Amino acid sequence: MDLKKLNVSDNFKTAVSERIKAGRMPHAVLITGTNAAARSSAAAFLAAAALCASENENEKPCDKCPDCVKCGKGVHPDIFKITGTDKPQSIKIGDIREIKAKSYILPNEARAKVFIIEEASGMGDVSQNAFLKILEEPPYFTCFILTAESESVFLPTILSRVTVFSTGEAGNAGKEKKAEQKAVLAASEIINRMLEGDEYGIMAASAPLAKDKLMFKRCAAELSYIFRDALRYGEDFEMLSSGNADIEAVSRKIKRDSLLKLLKKMSDLLDYTDKNANDNLLLTKLSIEIKIHNL
């Protein structure tokens, strides 16, 4: 199979490429779209991009390196895949436990290990809650890719911890890109103000998130990515999100213990957001949590 000939839209390829070049490859992705074959192709493309060994960030997946070749043949030892159906409970709690057990085993060959859950709508609430525990504190070398026709079947706690990619419908892709860019800019500005110890600046940078709870959650998730990868910076395996100035700056200036606390607080804050909390109170909590751990 030629990876570059997969049924993947240009919009999707561009979204993945921009993430890689910006050093912001998320650890958990949900791919949505009405065409099951397109979702499956997009998952295969993203998995190959995550494992690609090419040093050229502009051509991942390169379809040439040993990792890409094995991905194309469907024989890469660092890709684990399960497939559900549109029937509820088709993905059992045992499947999730197996993923969890395997996720803590180091990759065989690549820099990362990818878990693809196709038709993840087959997870019931019990399986989703079990999977949530892995999403909250994933091993640094893991990448989770879920596919489903719609976001609507997932618990809010799952959605708050994944990055949603569309298979490429032009209108939705454009809206998603703008929303993501806004969240990334807000998170970067908050990080800059945090590192300066500027409490008022943190509040000011958070202001654009007021009255937009979804954007607030996107920004909080982006902050979580930054804190997570700053914590992993310097590990034996190359980070999935490398070359990001915010990650490097946070890693240099914030102690490990504080990063661990920040990650936990961001997770708590995302849960708190789902409880219809007051917008102004959310912004206050965000500012306080970020400031008090900037040690």
Image (cartoon, rainbow, N blue to C red):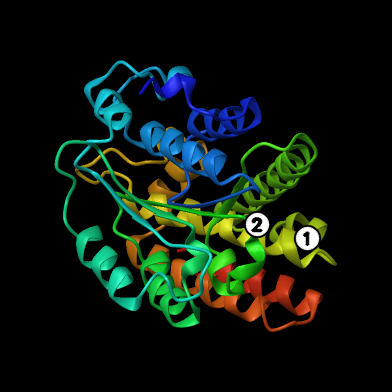
Return the x and y of residue 76 as percentages of the image width and height.
Answer: 23, 37
Return the x and y of residue 200 as percentages of the image width and height.
Answer: 74, 62
Q: The C terminus appears in which quarter of the rendering?
A: bottom left
Q: Is residue 70 above or below residue 237?
A: above
Residue at position x 45%, y 73% in the image: 264
Q: Nearer the viewer, residue 183 or 3?
A: 3
* Amino acid type at image mark 2: Cys
The residue beneath circle 2 is 219
Q: Is residue 150 above or below residue 62?
A: below
The residue beneath circle 1 is 209
Q: Is residue 247 left or right of residue 110?
A: right
Q: Nearer the viewer, residue 61 or 234?
A: 61
Q: Is residue 294 visible?
A: no
Q: Are marks 2 and 1 in contact (CB under 8 Å)?
A: yes
Residue at position x 27%, y 23% in the image: 69
Q: Is residue 146 visible?
A: yes
Residue furthest right as drawn: 211
